[in-house]
Image (spheres, coloured by chain):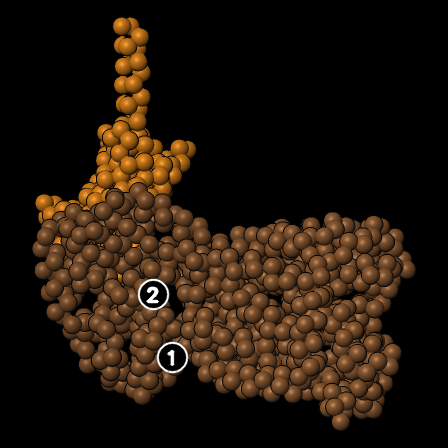
Chain colours: A orange, B brown
Amino acid sequence: MRLNKLIYLVATIAASASLADPLAEMSGSWHGSGWARETQQAPKETVRCKITNTYDDGAQILTLEGRCIVPGRRLKISGIISATEGSDRITGRWSNPTGLVSVPIVGIKRNGIVAFNFSATNPITGRKQSQNVEWRISNDSLRLRSSNRVDPTIMMSDISFRR
Amino acid sequence: MGAHWSGTQSARAVARIIGLSWGIGFGAERIGSAALKFPRTATVGLLMLLMIIGASLPQLSFDDDIHRVFLSDSPLSQAQLSYEAEQSPPQTKALIHINSTDAFTADDMTKLRDLSLDLEFVDGVTAVASPFILRWPPSAAAPSGTPLLGVELNSAFVDDLKRFNALATGLPTFLNDALDAMLLSVSINTNETTVVAALSAIKLVLANALDKNFSANITGEDVISAEIVSKLKGDLISLNLWGALIITIAAFALLRNFWMVLLAVVPAIIGTLGVLALSVWLGFPITVISNVVPILLLVLGVANGVHLTQHLKENGKVADAVNTVGPACALTALTTAVAFASITFTGNAQLFEFAVLGAIGTLFSFAVVIVTFAVLGRIIPRSNQPVPQISLIFAQQLVTMGTARPKVIILFCVLVLIFTTYGFTQTKAWFPLYQNLPDDSATIATNDAISTDFGGVFQMIIETHGEWAQTLALVEKLEAVSPEKQMLSEVSFARWLGHPNRQSTSNELKILPKALVNELGNGHNSSRIFVSIPEPMRSEASLALFDQLHDTALGAGANAIFGLPTLMRYEAVRLVERLSRGLTVAALGATFLVALAFRSVRLIPILIIPNVLPLMVTGASLHLWAQGQLSPTAVLALTIAFGIAIDDTVHFLNRYWKANSRNLNPTQAVGVAARSAGQVMVLTTLLLSFGLCVTLFSDFSPVRLFGGMMIVTLWTALLVDLLLLPALLTWGSATNAAQ
């Protein structure tokens, strides 16, 4: 019984530690599936992604690299997220599956969540986009959700990842 | 006619001018004499050669470029090569034909969409075209267009497909009309992976994704190449192993002595291994065509081995066998090499390699055979075991018939020659790709199914440099003769965008994959139209469809037409024509060579008729067993067969010549030749037939055709050499005797 309590205690501490640093938890290779839409009025499209995240413990920088596929189109996904020592604040750059160019981001990391927002102009259509992006880490899964920044009830993507 | 062996002054003069002080083998047999003179050096040399061969054989390579067999130096081939060079990175397409027992349901479509997405993640895959890439025309809300088959699929997808078809864009939907077959076109970057590796990964994805209600088969130009190569290796090994075994057993049955068999067969086997190694040294990969060279040279080597061994049995001296039979063996090697060399003029890279390998291989094999015979002949115990007399009786009876009624035989043979020549001229140049696939290949059926459901596996590429109106008119005319939805062009996208009468702007085309845009217009103010069709020579109907499309495109102002189907249709015919010219060169070249060897111009007609007749008989026989189709393989077989058919004539004339020089009259000399050479000619024809029989069990139809034609030619040549040749040699003297 004591042994069980000990294991529980160690697990809780470990979980707390990981929750305290979601960027580190996001590192590794992930396969995701879900949906995304091109504009807030556009219909959902089936999407598959494969990303590889690398975390630099010393510099506290997470580098994301991968590709997402909707039938007939393949898009690169990439980003660099830096944590600020002693703070929840994150900064970096981001390009998302809808094909935007790389844009600067600012956000937070807290309790298994990495969230940031960005604004950019689509180089092909000229359309402006502003989105909230949230990465949620729990156990061995990762979930990416994004929503319209002006009207957060409009979801732009929802992709679940597994290692 | 009376070919009394005086020769002619002119031939002797030619021989003197080019310095021919040697016998009919042009001195090539002296390599055997040298081996007898320096046996230790020869033995060490042979052992070293064997070691080099052993080290080289693991490096054998196999040709995996399907286009090479059709490519030449023609403008059409150059257009194809330019198009291929333009593809950056180099791409190939694998087509997956998926069938269901029933029409696809919404659940099925969901699974298949997941499959198409999974395939995108296979290493080296750059794109997957499927029904799921179809989109409704762009709108303000969905600038790239709304997917036709959305995230939540339900039974309404059937109606959506109908509505999409009603747009009449001409874009392929990758689904057949019955909705029980789907086509996935997987683009593979061959800089990133090999076709074999990609196929293996694709098969794994298919196995994981599809349940028992589905079946999936993969095809495509490079998939076919990969399949041919994978089977070719096994075929090469089994052909040569079984060939060596069968010919050894046959030699044992005919020579009836272990040591004599060893002496006849071992030199040929070493020669054959040497020829395989030669392909490595020359840097030539093995192809479906050159696959037959080693077994061919094995049987030729054994035939020479039997001639040498039989003489050794009769006379007991190795040197005598080398000096007496060696020259004839050398001449037969030269005539065969000439036959191979005549193929170098085709302008086709693959056939050039076949010709060079065959020509050098024949001479190399001869050298190895005669040296090995000289080395082994010194140590192998002699045998007095007589060979079966049936071969002698057979030879003598035919010769007797030929000399008894020469006029009748000659007349009969001339009539057969006329009849079969007519038959041969009625064959049709034909080169179907599917016949190059192994027999157990599922690809042939898959290609047929894709032809039925989606037009075909192969793409005819039509290029036009005209204005948009001309491109539009060209597409419309092609659509009038082509089945629906088998064409891809800029016109399809203009229709999809709603402005068929105007070319799409570069901005509009940005929503399409860049590689596709580049393929449709090569950036030089030209536009390409891709038409999916079956291989042209699959059937008369597919040939008619190709010709109709080709003529329509040309009539509507197309600037260039290429792609594999065009190569298969035109280069194949051109190849057969060039090979036929090569056959003529081989026939004339080998004939003049033999006439020169015997220093007799008068020999030319005596050589031409008996050696052309077997070719015409075999050529005409294609009507009986190859639907009258004259494929490049068939012409190759005829060319090489001529080189081999003349071998028997050489051996017969060699013995006749020697008898004639002893002041025997033509009839007596023919009798001597029949007893000595005739018997061995029957034996070697039997051996060659046994050896070549293994080709009839090949997985590849061209290999079987080649072997079958060789056997038919060899037997016809034997009959003609023992029947017509004696008749021609004794005709004049028989007339004189009667007078």
Image point (26%, 39%), residue name: A161
Q: Secondary structure at mark 2?
A: loop
Image point (77%, 61%), residue name: B310
Look at mark 2 in the image and give the residue it sits on.
B457
From this viewpoint, is residue B261 visible? yes
Q: Which quarter of the rendered picture does the C terminus of chain A lie within?
A: top left
Instruction: Count neighbours of disc 2 (C-alpha within 10 A) and say few if under 14, some if 14 to 19, many if 20 or more.
Output: many
Name which quarter of the figure residue B663 lies in.
bottom right
**Relative to B613, is B368 on the left or the right?**
right
**Relative to B249, is A134 on the left or the right?**
left
Name which quarter of the figure residue B314 lies in.
bottom right
Q: Nearer the viewer, residue A27 or B311?
A: B311
Task: Name, please, the residue furthest toward the right.
Answer: B37
Task: Name, please, the residue furthest toward the top.
Answer: A2
Q: Nearer the viewer, residue B422 or A119?
A: B422
Q: Position of residue B193 (x, y in %)?
A: 45, 53
- Under mark 1, the amino acid is Ile
Report whether mark 2 lies on the same chain as mark 1: yes
Look at mark 1 in the image and give the residue it sits on.
B561
Image point (65%, 65%), residue name: B685
**Relative to B628, is B395 on the left or the right?**
right
Instruction: Count neighbours of disc 1 (C-alpha within 10 A) and say few if under 14, some if 14 to 19, many if 20 or more.
Output: many
The chain containing the residue under callout 1 comes to B
Image point (75%, 64%), residue name: B307
**Relative to B197, is B172 on the left or the right?**
left
- Under mark 2, the amino acid is Val
Name which quarter of the figure residue B21 lies in.
bottom right
Task: Name, please, the residue furthest toward the bottom.
Answer: B739
Q: Position of residue B621 (x, y in %)?
A: 49, 75
Q: Secondary structure at mark 1?
A: strand
